[in-house]
Image (cartoon, rainbow, N blue to C red):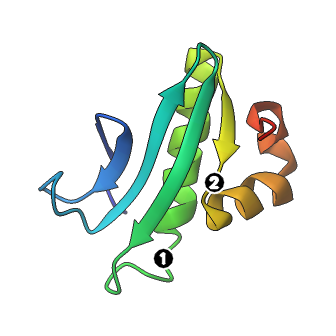
Amino acid sequence: MVTINKGENKFYVGDNIKDPVAELTFNQTGENKIVVDHTYVSDKLRGQGVAGKLVEKVVSFAREQDKKIIPLCPYVKRKLEETPAYHDVLGQQ
């Protein structure tokens, strides 16, 4: 199991925040929105569900902050739309 770390405007996997082996980046806009713009998973972690775990983290973060997620990243958009349990945090673009 991988450890997911929290950095400024990102969740990431790895020891170096500047060179992560997986990451999900976002920006907080306005008072109630998180814009997720990018996910990346290195070849060595692909196929292990890491991107899904990163989405889980940002969903939990959004709920804690009482914010909606605006998914610009196609993967995150699809994951939020296809997972009914995430619909409470899915915002409109």
In the image, residue 49 above or below residue 25: below
Answer left or right for 1 relative to 87. left
Q: Disc count in the image?
A: 2
Task: Identify which residue, 49 or 10, lies in the foreground.
Answer: 10
Helix, strand or loop for disc 1:
loop
Query: Where the C terminus falls, by quadrant?
Result: top right
Helix, strand or loop for disc 2:
loop
The residue located at (51%, 83%) in the rendering is 47
Answer left or right for 21 relative to 82. left
Q: Is residue 4 visible?
A: no
CA neighbours of label 2 inside 10 A, class few (<14), some (14 to 19), many (20+): some
Query: Given contact means CB atoms under 8 Å apart, are the residues at marks 1 and 2 in contact?
Result: no
Q: Is residue 8 visible?
A: yes
Instruction: Report the residue marked by disc 1.
Output: 48
Q: For the residue marked with disc 1, what is the amino acid?
A: Gln
Residue 32 occupies which quadrant of the picture?
top right
Query: Where the N terminus falls, by quadrant?
Result: bottom left
* Residue 9, position as x, y percentages in the image: 37, 37
Q: For the residue marked with disc 2, what is the amino acid?
A: Leu
Instruction: Report the residue marked by disc 2.
Output: 72
Residue 10 occupies which quadrant of the picture?
top left
* Residue 68, position as x, y percentages in the image: 70, 29
In the image, residue 31 above or below residue 84: above
The residue located at (37%, 46%) in the rendering is 11
The residue located at (12%, 56%) in the rendering is 16
Task: Identify which residue, 84 or 33, lies in the foreground.
Answer: 33
* Residue 56, position as x, y percentages in the image: 58, 47
